[in-house]
Amino acid sequence: MNKKGLYRIQDPKFNDVYMSLRLIFDLKYETVTKANLLNYLFSDRLEKYPTKQAITKAHDLLYGSKFSSYTYSIGKYQVIELSLIGINEKFVSEPLHQLYVDLLLETLNRPLINEETLREAKKNVSQAIKRQQENPTHYAIFKAFELAGKGQPFGISTQGYLEEIDDITLDDIKAFHQTLLKDAYKEFYVNGDVKTLDMESMRPLSGTSVIQTDIESKKVFEEQTATQSEIVQIYPVTIDPTHRLYYAYLLFLVILGQSPTSYLFRNIREKESLAYSIYASQLIYDGVFYVMTSVNPSQEDYVLKRIADQFTLIRKDSLNLDSAKQYIINKMEGISESPRQSIDFVFRNNRLNLSDSPQELIEAFKKVTEEEVKDVLGHIGSPYTFVYRGVNNEEIA
């Protein structure tokens, strides 16, 4: 399998084989909704199997293989991922591995795209967007990203846009599909006890996918009928995966708000009971991280002050890095126990232009010092703050 764009993780301990075909293309407002519709069409039926019963039977004949499709962003790119998991062919007398590949390529090249399937895709994608918008936490995150990243890839919602769906025609989707087949980068990943596959080379994406998002420091409010306010703060960071402080930065995020002993969790949730949930999360490809929490509307300003206080405390306190390091080490050690995580790790390396192994990352984290963690603070900018403020009906009126 020494072909371009084909990545094999030979791991005989798994009874199953996990395959993932990933399309990578520019993330654009003009195409993101089409990509979501096409993603649904990939997961529906094929020209070769034009009914739901036929596609179900096709998977049943492959000993119950399971197919899934996803779409998400990595910096300035959008990804559509077609994945299949099935038993290893060593347990049967059929060339299952090649049949899995053939089905994935059939899915990529010939999904069933007609008026009926597009109508169903529009209905399901619309419902998915509405469900996200009706969830205050999800809405606040998407809205914060949209506003803070306006005019940049970060500001484009990878779930698509309701107002775009009705105007997309069958010809639009067919043309977009053909464009992806011709122009998208394509990479194929397989994890399991798989020795050879008959495949053509793919078209891999080279170079790093990391971008730097420009974030303006400001505070924006929007009202909702609710008893809680959702707060999202987005912080720009000038530390990318090639920076000398990158591993210190990841440890800083654990200490700030990613573990049960983090500053945000202990001081804002546990000690003062100001929030049921509060956490920090990194967006590795966009050069930002964000803090998310839900609070009583009357305590918004105080909670924002207390969030800012945690950065000061981290700067002043004597930090015990052991628990934060162990938190990350446990995650790294778990990668090899999951076919999906193992593939995602190789995909991550490809996107960051790295070749680290999980063990090499573990050794790098072990070497991080307290001084380096505190130095991270000098590379964090002021946040963009979005408050999805809860008010009652009387207040709105």
Image: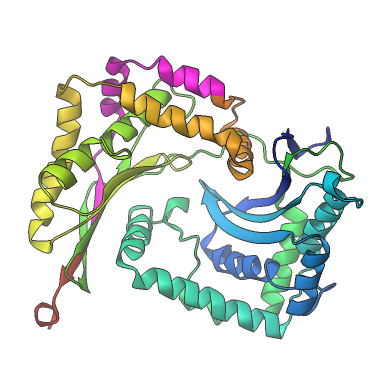
Part of the protein shown in magenta: 359-386
Majority SS type along the magenta span: helix
Q: 305 or 167: nearer the eye? A: 305
Q: Residue at x 73, y 72 (%)?
A: 174
Q: Is 300 rendered above or below residue 45? A: above
**As drawn, which residue projects farthest toward the front?**
91
Q: Indicate the quadrant where residue 30 lies.
A: bottom right
User: Dividing the image into 4 quarters, which one contains the N terminus?
Assistant: top right
Q: Is 174 rendered above or below residue 315? A: below
Q: Is 285 placed left or right of 267 in the picture? A: right
Q: Is 250 placed left or right of 168 in the picture? A: left
Q: Indicate the quadrant where residue 114 lies.
A: bottom right
Q: Residue at x 77, y 65 (%)?
A: 59
Q: Residue 158: within the magenta?
A: no
Is residue 240 visible in the rendered structure shown here?
A: no
Is residue 327 visible in the rendered structure shown here?
A: yes
Q: Is 234 placed left or right of 33 in the picture? A: left
Task: Please count the marks in the image.
Answer: 0
Q: Is 166 rendered above or below residue 307? A: below
Q: 332 or 396: nearer the eye? A: 332
Q: Residue at x 30, y 67 (%)?
A: 136
In the rendered image, residue 42, in percent from the top left (x then y), is placed at 69, 66
Q: 88 or 51: nearer the eye? A: 88
In the rendered image, residue 159, in percent from the top left (x then y), is placed at 49, 64
Q: Which of the colour schemes (rainbow, by chain, secondary structure, one colour) is used?
A: rainbow
Q: Is 341 placed left or right of 307 in the picture? A: right
User: Dividing the image into 4 quarters, which one contains the C terminus?
Assistant: bottom left
In the rendered image, residue 8, in percent from the top left (x then y), is placed at 75, 36
Q: Residue 369: within the magenta?
A: yes
